Image (tube, rainbow, N blue to C red):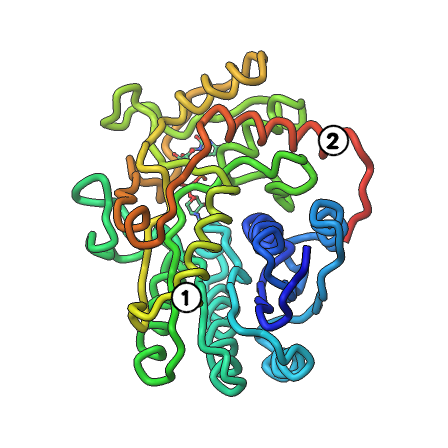
Amino acid sequence: MTVNNKNTILVTGGTGYIGSHTVVALHERGYRVVIADNLSNSHRFMLDRIAEITGQAHPFYAIDLCDKKALKALFEQEQDIVASIHFAAFKAVGESVEKPLTYYRNNLVSLMNLLEVQQQFGVAKLVFSSSCTVYGEPDTLPVTEDSPIKPASSPYGNTKQMGEEIIADFTNVSGIKAIALRYFNPVGAHHSALIGEYPNSVPNNLVPFITQTAIGKQQELKIFGSDYQTPDGTCIRDYIHVVDVAAAHIAALDRLMNHTDVQAFEVYNIGTGTGYSVLEMVKAFEKVSGKTLPYRLTNRRQGDIEKVYADTSHSNKVLHWKAQKSLEEMMHSAWLWEQKLNSQTHTSK
Ligand code: WQD
């Protein structure tokens, strides 16, 4: 595939879960990709996996974006960068409650450094990894991009809200144009099962906990709360295949690169528009895996909201993007990834 070097995209956090899938999608779209990651919450072997999928290695800079000097050196080295996609951030909700300053410093200083260095080097396009957590517990469903932003329920969620505000204020005065993508619940893995969600410790998130339980790494799934005001009493979320999330970044980048009517700062919901309960997710997994999942109904988890799912009409219409993959494909790909992860020895960091 011929790659036009004038279309070099910087992906920060590119060895992470959504970042790695987006690097693959960018390559397949003909972009040249440069990856920056400090590997604090991901693994160097993901670079080999990405290379195996794309058929080539991608320039990698093991830097921390809080180190502005290192970030400037990257931009001096990579003069063809025309846009960046910013994933690099800490994202564990519970950990953010215990270590708020670590989260505010890391997630906001890295973002501000990127904005300043992009302005300095005339890189005028940014796609920002945001989150549906900005909506908190919505008053009405489905949530649209105009739904009220509720007080964040964690420092992590607050860094996403503040990140959007920082970008909105800076794009007003800097000539940079930015799109924030508010992800709902990314799950699943690339069909090759070479890249996927790789928790550093016991998973917080539902789907990796399900697959680790099915493979025997966890004893049983604890379902946090069965007394919610939902049809089966368990929480509802808008789960979306990570490959569809990656495709949304391509759509956002295309809009920034090729459209003249882009506002200084735009936000889009990246979900499927359909909510599934925890028990429905368990049943979907059992259907695709043929396994019976051991689970126990336990107390609610602090900070969980009852139900949230997206109105994606704005993304569908303006980004010309729509989630394509089914719940079965989400679960099947997640299960294949878990099985492959446990069938091979792989180099650690
Ligand atoms: C989903 C549902 C749990 C684990 C995540 C990220 C957040 C944001 C949105 C990025 C909830 C239940 C879970 C378990 C369970 N993404 N559950 N047993 O909380 O919606 O938030 O997606 O910004 O950062 O954390 O996702 O997968 O943790 O939980 O019953 O062992 O599954 O109670 O109802 P959540 P989750």
Judge from the rendering whether residue 230 lies leftward or rightward of residue 63; answer left or right: left
| Residue at (57% x, 54% y) in the render | 29
Q: Residues within 10 Å of mark 2 (few under 14, many from 20)?
A: few
Judge from the rendering whether residue 27 lies leftward or rightward of residue 163; answer left or right: right
Q: Nearer the viewer, residue 288 or 134?
A: 288
Residue identifier under label 2? 342
Q: Secondary structure at mark 2?
A: loop
Q: Residue furthest left?
A: 140
Instruction: Specify the quarter for ligand 1.
Output: top left
Quadrant the C terminus occupies:
bottom right
Judge from the rendering whether residue 100 lies leftward or rightward of residue 41; answer left or right: left
**Type of the residue with mark 2:** Asn
Q: Nearer the viewer, residue 137 or 28?
A: 28
Task: State whether residue 64 is above or below residue 246.
Answer: below
Q: Secondary structure at mark 1?
A: helix
Q: How far, Cα to Cα, is label 1 from label 2?
A: 42 Å
Q: Which mark is residue 258?
A: 1
**Type of the residue with mark 1:** Asn
